[in-house]
Amino acid sequence: MTARELSAQMQTKRSCLCVGLDPDLDRLPSVLDGESYPLFIFNREIIDATAQYAVCYKPNTAFYECYGSWGWQQLEMTVGYIKEHYPEIMVIADAKRGDIGNTAGRYARAFFENMPCDAVTVAPYMGRDSVDAFLAYKDKWAVVLGLTSNASAADFELQGDLYKRVISCAMQWGTADNMMFVAGATRPELLADIREICPDHFLLVPGVGAQGGSVEQVVRYGRNSRCGLLINSSRGIIYASRGGDFAIAAARAAEALTGQMQSIFI
């Protein structure tokens, strides 16, 4: 997926919503009890209910890998379903891979060839070698961890403004058409500093909803001329209801969150 295609979808839907597909067997509605592939069925219903609002889906691979090959199969089924039925919607594999060399190349192959994802989250701690393999694919994206939304990001990322140094360095590896940065919604005022470093790149913004981040604050500090934001919500949408109406509730939550984004597209 190209940056032009992503931007066009945002304008069409008047949305920059990214829905995190993080299904937990312990939290799935009881109506899915007995299903052979409950993670996939849950995801499929969420996807069909929210596709009119979402420009991106972001499955976190941990929620599938923890169930072994059975879980991984359902991740593949989920990505395949999106690409078959909603090919215009971006898929980010939230895998946070961070290795180098041949290993990094195999990770890139796993998500870009064997599973048709558009992007992968990447940890840049080991430097450029952690990212290059993902940038080698045409019309694919590396989503580099910059400033994350968790409280203990302060342990390293905020020390001496390390996140700024990471983003400034990573800017030299890719372009605004194949690299994004993760920038958490829980410290929205720092998005302005990040925008000074990378004015043209897309930012994947987690932390809205369950973690307390504000769409209004993210838009105020983080938008650019082409919107430039993918605002993610996971639990706030997919667990809007634990009952048989879970898909309807997810659609309502997605619609409400998208409504908060309208100021970007005026």
Image (tube, helix red, strand yellow):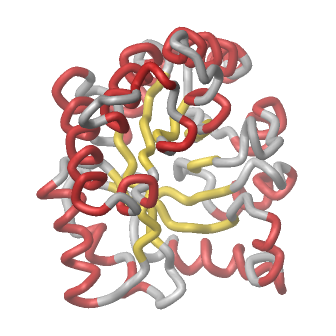
Q: Front-most of 251 and 12?
A: 251
Name the residue: 40% across, 25% down. Answer: 32
Examine the rendering and report whether any part of residue 266 can be seen: no
**On the rendered structure, is 176 left or right of 84?**
right
Q: Front-most of 106 and 60?
A: 60
Examine the rendering and report whether any part of residue 206 can be seen: yes
Quadrant containing the C terminus is top right
Q: Residue furthest left?
A: 114
Where is residue 100? Give x, y as percent: 33, 88
76, above or below 219, in the image: below
Where is residue 125? Give x, y as percent: 54, 86
247, above or below 80, in the image: above
Name the residue: 38% across, 31% down. Answer: 43
Quadrant containing the N terminus is top left
**On the rendered structure, is 172 left or right of 265?**
left
Where is residue 48? Give x, y as percent: 37, 16
62, above or below 234, in the image: below
Q: Residue furthest right?
A: 189
Where is residue 104? Give x, y as percent: 28, 80
Count of marks overlaid on the render: 0
Residue 227 found in image quarter: top right
Name the residue: 37% across, 41% down. Answer: 3
Residue 197 found in image quarter: bottom right
Name the residue: 55% across, 59% down. Answer: 181
